Image (cartoon, grey):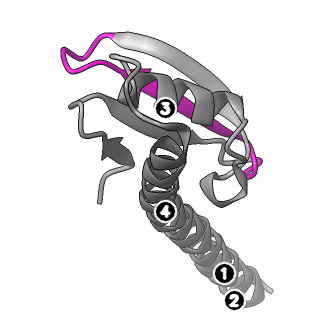
């Protein structure tokens, strides 16, 4: 699963989640040629307001020609936000699984050390 959403304009938004603080998400905007055109740190996608810096950047990209009405832009942003939220939830699941795997490996290592210590006694 990818953590990138593609807009109708072929521009992309990539989510980078802070593993130590999952409520801190970096949104990286790239144009259709792959050049970075913006970066914002904000909350998870589901909590973004239509006036957030991420929403404004997204709407600006979707309305380059300035001909789309605000209601339509808000609806388009809501759709993008839902896609970003799905990507966010998938990334969080992956991070949680990685943490669980590390914890399990550490517990196995501790059990082996305990058994070795008991055997030596």
Residue 8 lies in what quarter of the image? top left
Q: Is residue 105 above or below residue 40?
A: below
Q: Is residue 63 above or below residue 78?
A: above
* Mark found first going from the N terminus, 1 or 4: 4
Alpha carbon separation for disc pair 1 and 3: 58 Å
The residue wearing badge 2 is 119
Q: Is residue 65 above or below residue 4?
A: above
Q: Does residue 32 belong to the magenta stretch?
A: yes
Q: Using a 10 Å C-alpha cutoff, classify the residue at mark 3 as few (fewer than 14 neighbours), some (14 to 19) or many (20 or more).
A: many
Alpha carbon separation for disc pair 3 and 4: 13 Å
Alpha carbon separation for disc pair 1 and 2: 5 Å
Q: Which mark is residue 58?
A: 3
* Mark found first going from the N terminus, 1 or 3: 3
Marks 1 and 2 close (CB-CB < 8 Å): yes
* Mark found first going from the N terminus, 3 or 2: 3
Q: Residue at x 43, y 50 (%)?
A: 76
Q: Which of labels 1 and 4 is toward the front?
A: 4
Q: Quadrant of the N terminus?
A: bottom left
The residue wearing badge 1 is 116
* Mark found first going from the N terminus, 4 or 2: 4
Please, what secondary structure does the residue beneath circle 3 have? helix
- The span picked out in magenta is 21-35
Alpha carbon separation for disc pair 3 and 2: 62 Å
Image-based side of 15 in relation to 108, left or right: left
The residue wearing badge 4 is 82
Residue 106 lies in what quarter of the image? bottom right
* Mark found first going from the N terminus, 3 or 4: 3
Q: Using a 10 Å C-alpha cutoff, classify the residue at mark 1 as few (fewer than 14 neighbours), some (14 to 19) or many (20 or more).
A: few
């Amino acid at each position: 699963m990818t953590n990138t959403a593609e807009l109708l304009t072929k521009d992309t938004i990539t989510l980078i989640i802070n593993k130590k603080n999952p409520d801190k998400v970096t949104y990286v905007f790239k144009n259709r040629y792959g050049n970075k055109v913006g970066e914002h740190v904000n909350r998870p996608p589901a909590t973004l307001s239509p006036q957030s810096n991420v929403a404004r950047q997204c709407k600006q990209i979707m309305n380059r020609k300035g001909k789309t009405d605000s209601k339509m832009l808000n609806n388009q942003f809501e759709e993008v936000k839902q896609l970003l939220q799905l990507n966010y939830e998938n990334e969080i699941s992956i991070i949680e699984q990685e943490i669980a795997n590390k914890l399990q490996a550490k517990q196995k290592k501790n059990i082996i050390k305990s058994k070795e210590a008991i055997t030596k006694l």
